[in-house]
Image: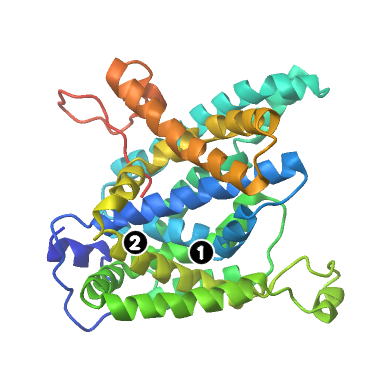
Amino acid sequence: MSEAAISATAGSRNFSASEPGKLPGRVQWVDYAKGFCIIFVVMMHSTLGVEKAAGDTGWMHYLVQFAKPFRMPDFFMISGLFLGLVISRPWLRYIDRKVVHFAYFYVLWMTIQFVAKAPQWVGEGQSLAEVMQFWAVSLVQPFGTLWFIYMLPIFFIVTRLIKQVPWFITLGFAAVLEILPIHTGWLLVDEFASRYVYFLAGYMFAANIFRLADWTQKNAKIAILGLIVWAVINGVLTFTPVPEMITAGLGLEAGSIYLSDLPLVSLALGAAGAVAIILTTTLLSNLKWTAFLAYIGRNSIVVYLAFFLPMAVSRIILLKFAPFLDIGTVSALVTLAGVSGPIILHLMINWTGYGKFLFERPSWAVIDKPKATKTGPSLQPAE
């Protein structure tokens, strides 16, 4: 990526007084960051699912809890990172790439999940009409694991509409939304309030983020020291329960929330964690044996869309046929299946040529059609 492109990434919201550092032709750490984040997302769903089914917790639970403050903030920050390059496109193209694109995959994979889960729901007493009603409701109430790609188009549209508003107003308002205890029960509202500030920061401070990654390459020892300090602070705040006198005043059960869940603290840890992931993945990008992270990152949307099935199947098989394994190990193996399963499926689809519609948007779902093209539409990463 050129220096000019990096500056353009933040559009007019480049707040650093210094010139951007020179970066290599391809910004490898971004792929590493996406790979790192999607693994932690799959890990969370896999571990909590195993623990719920087994009625017990394992050693993976602590890793999932440690990652809670930064897991989704960093994912959304990375998603907003390159928005400055496309935010001024014509509206039709912008909506096609940033709304219709994700809407297609959301409806498709929501339907696939419903088909996979419908027999269980019907077996539990729900009628087919109730299942279909649930499907319809999921068009306005983000469904299950797919809520991330439901929220992205909303973030893209809102950011486009407010891009002329002074940055300190929009960012400040988004930060206030994150701090406020907004719990309406409507996922669309609640997740917008708690996540939009990180997406907005990725868009607004893109040039600064690239400079930070460039600095990390040149100051690895200092970056590692900073990561150690961050890990200690994040760990202490994440594993320390809020004092009982405070939870009692809030009407909550003792030990139900941790210091990291408190207003302002969660915002600070989310921002610090996002910076930590930038430093971590930048350092990892220098190690050849970690190249698998970049590959997973380039296919992050593939993993995100399809991990639910290998995750569920492997959980059932391992809990039933491998009782000698502890819960933590089962969670780790289910995570491995959840990440590798979609990758294998994607490779098989590319090899056979069948099923490409699962991860590539077909031409009929494109509203901004090019005048002339020799190849079909390709998969666009969830950035």
Placement of 351 over or under 12, stated as above or below:
above
Name the foreground residue: 233 vs 133: 233
Say the numbered circle drawn on residue 153.
Answer: none
Percent across and percent down for residue 83 are 32, 56
Name the foreground residue: 240 vs 126: 240
Q: Residues within 10 Å of mark 1 (few under 14, many from 20)?
A: many
* Residue 362 seen in this snapshot: no
Percent across and percent down for residue 167 are 39, 74
- Image-quadrant location for residue 182: bottom right
* Residue 276 seen in this snapshot: yes
Q: Secondary structure at mark 1?
A: loop
- Report the number of discs: 2
- Image-quadrant location for residue 68: bottom right
Disc 1 target residue: 70
Amino acid type, label 2: Thr
Q: Residues within 10 Å of mark 2 (few under 14, many from 20)?
A: many
Amino acid type, label 1: Phe
In front: label 2 or label 1: 2
- Image-quadrant location for residue 281: bottom left
Disc 2 target residue: 281
Percent across and percent down for residue 339 are 46, 39
